[in-house]
Image (cartoon, rainbow, N blue to C red):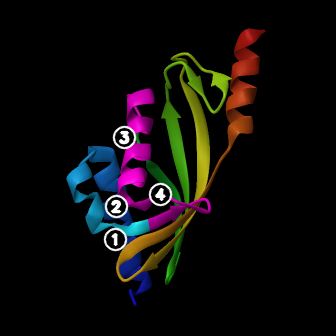
Amino acid sequence: MMTKENLASFYRDYIACLNNQTWDALDRFVGAEVVHNGKCLGLTGYREMLESDFQHIPDLRFNIGLLICEPPYVACRLDFRCAPKGRFLDLDVNGRTVAFTENVFYKVESGKIAEVWSVIDKGAIEAQLAVRRR
């Protein structure tokens, strides 16, 4: 089992992998049978989800706002400021810059992410879009 410090370092390296879009290295961090919000995506499906995120949000960057590690779990608040193309979370963002957070919990088993629970603050985006419509 990883220590708190090792787990934090592992997670920061994982975020760097995402931000650099080094998809061929993703298997260093994510297990072959990874589960996301209760659905088994497997490594291939997880990678496809992330690649799609970057296609729809060209300026996407994962920023760690708060990180807590308690092996085998990681809890993180990710901060985003980006301009999704078209619709995002069923909202007409259409290239406008929005700021929001994502609260994510991970379970790490055998040195790889095995399970992910994620919630995006859609309300923050809705509020920003409503203010801009006035």
* Residue type highlighted by circle 1: Phe
The mark closer to the camera, 1 or 4, is 4
Marks 3 and 1, how far apart at CA: 21 Å
Horizontal and vertical percent position of residue 129: 70, 21
The mark closer to the camera, 2 or 4, is 4
Note whether residue 57 is visible: no
Q: Quadrant of residue 26?
A: bottom left
Q: Is residue 42 left or right of residue 35?
A: left
Residue marked by disc 1? 10
In terms of sequence position, does the residue under pointer 4 or pointer 3 come before the other? 4
Residue range (magenta): 34-60
Residue marked by disc 3? 51
In terms of sequence position, does the residue under pointer 1 or pointer 4 come before the other? 1
Marks 1 and 4, how far apart at CA: 21 Å
Determine whether the residue tagged by mark 2 lies in a helix, strand or loop.
helix
State yes or no: discs 1 and 4 in contact (Cβ < 8 Å). Answer: no
* Residue type highlighted by circle 2: Tyr
The mark closer to the camera, 3 or 2, is 3
Dot 4 crowding, Cα within 10 Å, few <14, some 14–19, many 20+: some
Horizontal and vertical percent position of residue 84: 50, 26
Nearest to the observer: residue 80 or residue 91? 91
In terms of sequence position, does the residue under pointer 3 or pointer 1 come before the other? 1
